Amino acid sequence: MKRILITGATGNVGSEVIRFLMETNTVNEIIAGVRNIDKARESFKNYPKLQLANFDFENQESFDIALAGIDTVFLLRPPHISDIETYFEPLINKIKEKNVTEIVFLSVQGAELSKVIPHNKIERLITESGCDYIFLRPSYFMQNLTTTLLKDIQTKRKIVLPAGKAKFNWIDIENIGEVCAILLNQFSDFKNQSIELTGTENEDFYSVADKINQNLNSNITFQNVSPFKFYSIKKNEGLNKGLIIVMIMLHFLPRFQKPPRISDFFERVIGKKPTTLSEFIKRERNIILGKLSV
Ligand SMILES: NC(=O)c1ccc[n+]([C@@H]2O[C@H](COP(=O)([O-])OP(=O)(O)OC[C@H]3O[C@@H](n4cnc5c(N)ncnc54)[C@H](OP(=O)(O)O)[C@@H]3O)[C@@H](O)[C@H]2O)c1
């Protein structure tokens, strides 16, 4: 039996990782590393076997206790943390010092191609630490439609991005959680591998808007804007500057890149096809439509 610490446990991916570990009755001890234990206790009240520990990426004093007796860490980078030297270097050093030997890191597809993106820097720190690792590199989350892009969809009936006709590969976070649970439980089978995890569809935002409309009988459009226009729209809406820049990089740069590679990892390991966009849209119908009348 291993003791596994899950960081980012209350977020989109972390909560699915916890769900799959708990619902499959893992033999391992699972500890959710969270900033607010009371809030997490409420969120995870259906999982009595789940343990909670105080863990804050931005408070190094929390590392010692959270990592005590841990064998494996599920590590992710909260989206607002991009200063890797300040926050991740001390953490990886502490992981090593505490004899944690296994790290599953939630990276991003294409992380190996750019030395400037935070995930690339974190992957290098982990490799240099000598810990065994699995780098899971998922493609573009379908759940961006129900989180970061949702307000525009609900209030403007538009998806507004500087993405042009760039194609994104769309993956369901539920599929990521299911795979992570297997990687954590069967770490040695995948040790020291970098794994791309994708869905089966490469689609641009024009066709995603079409798919939403076909499935939900709605009238959502995709509005392509320049990066400057996007910056000014989002700044006026009060969005954090760093987050706007990340959104521009994430959606504008793929216009100059080849369409993403499609991986069959999910089907090989789980034995079923990943979620399609149409399945996701129908499943999340109520969230996507929100205040929209059909
Ligand atoms: N969006 C995409 O298409 C995409 C694709 C591939 C990879 N990724 C990567 O996926 C990662 C984001 O995953 P996600 O969507 O699951 O993130 P998320 O939903 O924003 O969740 C972030 C998690 O980190 C926790 N957290 C934030 N600051 C913390 C701190 N100082 N100390 C401890 N915990 C903290 C949050 O906890 P609280 O509840 O305390 O806030 C939350 O549990 C990013 O690294 C992103 O680059 C995203």
Image: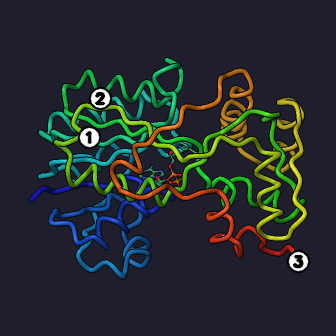
Spot occupied by residue 250 in the image (x, y as percentages of width and height): 66, 34
Image quadrant in which you'd find residue 189: top left
Residue nearer the viewer, 169 or 229: 169
The label nearer to you, 2 versus 3, is 3
x%, y% of residue 31?
Answer: 25, 62
Q: Of residues 82 and 176, which is closer to you in this image?
A: 176
CA–CA distance in space, label 2 to label 1: 8 Å
Residue pointed to by mark 1: 103
The type of residue carrying mark 3 is Ser
Q: Quadrant location of residue 123?
A: top left
| Residue 281, image x, y percentages | 68, 64
Q: Residue at x 36, y 82 (%)?
A: 46
Q: Which residue is mark 2?
A: 126
Residue 15, percent across and down?
Answer: 43, 63
CB-based contact (under 8 Å), mark 2 and mark 1: yes
- Specify which label sits upstream in the sequence, 1 or 3: 1
The residue type indicated by label 1 comes to Ile
> Are circles 1 and 3 on residues that touch, CB within 8 Å?
no
Q: Secondary structure at mark 2?
A: helix
Of labels 2 and 3, earlier in sequence is 2
Q: Which residue is mark 3?
A: 293
Q: Residues within 10 Å of mark 3 (few under 14, many from 20)?
A: few
Give the spatial CA distance, label 2 vs label 3.
Answer: 48 Å
Callout 3: SS = loop
Asked whether mark 3 and ligand 1 are closer than 8 Å, the reply comes as: no
